Amino acid sequence: MGVPGRIIEAESVVKELRGALARSGITLPSLGLDPITCMNEKLGLLIDLGRCTPDTARRLAAVLPGPAAEGP
């Protein structure tokens, strides 16, 4: 798949993830494609989850399946 196809597919995944997060009341404002990997076919295209507030990170951790991680 060429660069345009990879970008279209990745944008679809970003939209899917944004929707899933929204259904859980979570917004990652910086969610998007990593611009450096978008144009390089040798690198795997990456989705940048971006930064979020501690409250958002806590809400995200709460909706992920599995046991809570133990602190150090």
Image (cartoon, helix red, strand yellow):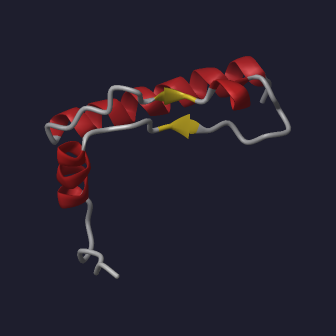
Residue 29: image quadrant is top left
Residue 9: image quadrant is top right
In the image, farthest residue toward the top: 4
Q: Residue 63 location in percent, x, y?
A: 19, 56
Q: Residue at x 71, y 28 (%)?
A: 36
Q: Residue at x 30, y 78 (%)?
A: 71
Task: Please give left or right for residue 59 compared with residue 48 in the image.
Answer: left
In the image, farthest residue toward the front: 72
Q: Residue 17 location in percent, x, y?
A: 37, 37
Residue 41: image quadrant is top right
Answer above or below: position of 39 versus 56: above
Q: Residue 45 location in percent, x, y?
A: 68, 36
Closer-to-camera residue (38/9): 38
Answer above or below: position of 33 versus 71: above
In the image, farthest residue toward the right: 42
Answer above or below: position of 52 versus 33: below
Task: Please give left or right for residue 45 compared with residue 58 in the image.
Answer: right
Which quadrant: the N terminus? Answer: top right
Q: Residue 21 location in percent, x, y?
A: 26, 39
Closer-to-camera residue (45/2): 45
Task: Please give left or right for residue 53 compared with residue 42 in the image.
Answer: left
Q: Residue at x 31, y 38 (%)?
A: 52
Which quadrant: the C terminus? Answer: bottom left
